[in-house]
Amino acid sequence: MGDNNKSNGAVYLTRERLVELEHQLHELKLKGRAEMAQKIHEARSHGDLSENAEYDAAKEEQQHLELRIAKLELTLARAQIIESKDLPNDKVYILSSVKLKDLESKESVTYLLVSPEEADFEKNKISVTSPIGKGLMGKTQGEKIKIPVPAGTLEYEILEITR
């Protein structure tokens, strides 16, 4: 599933993440655009537009807002809902929760493999397209793996795969 995302353009999201993104888009379109129009109106009222830095900044901010809206709309248009119950439990796939033992430090860590749009390292949600995510995809419980990362090579044993 990991590398297929690029070929068919699909963005795999959980239902919860899809709802979050739809909410963000709604807020940006309504509140964000209204606030931006107000900023531009205020800046415009300050006189000569050719030398009005506030107006230029507001117009640039408007472009960034519209770019964020367009990116969100594109993501949502390509979104496909995935449910962990629909995926097999024998190997590591997207939405797998994988408990690993670091073979060097002997410490264990659990990662949830998610789409790049849902990745959040602080919450141990890693992207299937990250070096660790790619290294884990398709592996099975009990397997020992070496994953090349920018800082060197990580060596893990897969202790458990759950959904």
Image (cartoon, helix red, strand yellow):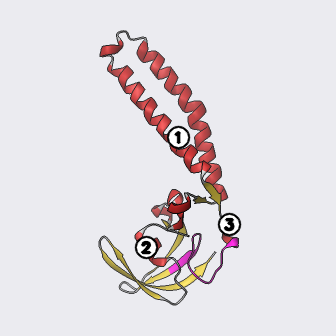
- Crowding at mark 3 (Cα within 10 Å: few <14, some 14-19, many 20+): some
Label 2 sits on a secondary structure element that is helix
Q: Residue at x 51, y 21 (%)?
A: 38
Q: Is residue 18 left or right of residue 105?
A: right
Amino acid type at circle 1 is Ala
**Residue receiving disc 1:** 70
Q: Which residue is mark 2?
A: 132
Query: Which type of secondary structure does the marked residue at label 3 adopt?
Result: loop
For the stretch drawn in magenta, the main secondary structure is: loop
Secondary structure, mark 1, is: helix
- Asked whether, in this view, residue 130 is left or right of residue 161, the answer is left
Q: Nearer the viewer, residue 119 or 86?
A: 86
Magenta-highlighted residues: 86-99
The quadrant of the image that shows the C terminus is: bottom right
Residue hosting label 3: 83
> Going from the N terminus, do you reach mark 3 or mark 2 first?
3
User: At x 54% / y 86%, what residue is drawn?
Assistant: 140
Residue 157, x across and y down, in percent: 46, 86
The quadrant in which the N terminus is found is: bottom right
Q: Earlier in the sequence, mark 1 or mark 2?
A: 1
Residue drawn at x 65%, y 64% as measured from the top left = 82
